[in-house]
Image (tube, rainbow, N blue to C red):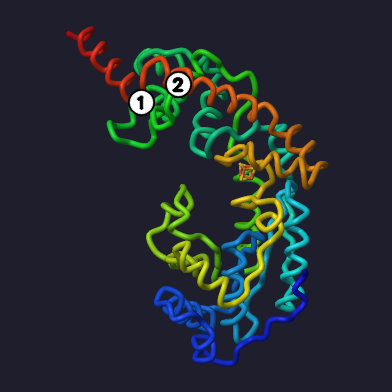
Amino acid sequence: MEDTSRETQFSNLDDIIQSCPKNTVIVNNIIKAYHKINSDIYKKIACAISGGADSDIMLDICHKCDDNNKINYVWCDTGLEYQATKDHLKYLEKKYDIEIKVNKAPKPIPIICHKYGQPFLSKAVSEYILRLQKHNFDFKDGTFDELITKYPNCKIALQWWCNEAGESSRFNIRQNKWLKEFMIANPPAFKISNKCCTYAKKDIMKKYLEENNIDLNITGIRKAEGGARAVAYKSCFDDNVDKYDNYRPLFWYKDSDKSEYEEKHGIIHSKCYSEYGLKRTGCAGCPFGRDFEQELEAIKKFEPKLFKAVNNIFGDSYEYTREYKKFCKEMDKKYGSYTAYLGGMTKINKEEDE
Ligand code: SF4
């Protein structure tokens, strides 16, 4: 049943703390959030709402702490959003009696993917492949010296392709098992790129922050979520002297803290979680999602029009990912494991050098 009650704002920090679970992470976080948000240093604050579970908790914290209604809530519409997310945003507006400003991407994801290419596997992998494709790379094997002679302006991507970024570096293609072997056997016949993340998400929020003279930017990044976003930061706050400061209230929250907060404050998440059974929200059907097949099933069942759209936009990438996964299984069976295969290759190379 829809929750139609309005959330009341607290009048002081003690009341907020009293209302919270007796959990050090949560209480320390509330104290910090309260002081950041109500600090005189900040005249204009933005809080990026996604409609996801972490964002729901962040909004609840911000709303409780914002004594002077300084926070501007913003949602970036990438052009590939669940109806469930849009409905949830309406629910949040009503619950907290706030306006969530819609910041539309000037170029939505379908147009960006058509022009620059489809995301495949991860942001970093897509970036390297984009660079290689820009130079008409033929996805054949070769030493770095041979390839750099043939493609002189493609150094960074070739270092990745040739595993030349250092023994334990994550900027080597071998970080993704069998990917190089797969791409040599099956060079991509479509354009791959991570540009939709840059143009439909990152850039529009950056533009909003600058155009609106925002001095504090609040986002829902959690360290425990892992991934490139979370590892890029060391703490919940960084001050950017001449632009805006960044604050991540949920940075130290573990999953258990989230659950405790949700339970105590009766947080209701979007139908993407409660009905569709998804573990994440965000752009519908993004090929970066580890469980994209499961997500596609849910989209097909609950938002059939969106299912057609995501297949039109990301269809090549879905197919290529399926082929890659199949390839990994076959190669694991043939060689035992990728590590065993790499060990064998090192031995052969050593013998050839001698
Ligand atoms: S999350 Fe996926 S679909 Fe969304 S902008 Fe980034 S790459 Fe594109």
- Residue at disc 2, secondary structure: helix
Quick check: marks 1 and 2 in contact, CB under 8 Å?
yes
Q: Position of residue 180 (x, y in %)?
A: 45, 21
Disc tally is 2
User: Which image quadrant for residue 213?
Assistant: bottom right
Element at label 1: loop
Left or right: where 237 falls relative to 5: left
Is there any visible trace of residue 202 in the rendered image? no
In the depicted structure, whether residue 121 falls above or below residue 221: above
**Horizontal and vertical percent for residue 280?**
60, 52
Direction from residue 333 to residue 80 in the image, left or right: right
Camera sees residue 86: yes
The residue sitting at 69% across, 35% down in the picture is 113
Q: Nearer the viewer, residue 164 or 329?
A: 329
Which quadrant: the N terminus? bottom right
Pointer 2 residue Cβ closer than 8 Å to ligand 1:
no
Q: Earlier in the sequence, mark 1 or mark 2?
A: 1
Quadrant in which ligand 1 is drawn: top right
Using residue 56 as the reference point, say whether residue 176 is left or right of it. Answer: left
Three-letter amino acid code at the position of disc 1 = Asn
Q: Residue at x 65, y 23 (%)?
A: 190
Q: Is residue 348 left or right of residue 150?
A: left
Asked whether mark 1 and ligand 1 are closer than 8 Å, the reply comes as no
Mark closer to the observer (1, 2): 2
Identify residue for label 2.
180
Q: Looking at the figure, which quarter contains the C terminus?
A: top left
User: Label 2 amino acid?
Assistant: Lys
User: Whole-percent x and y of residue 206?
Assistant: 60, 57
Q: Is residue 214 above or below residue 314?
A: below
Q: Which mark is residue 163?
A: 1
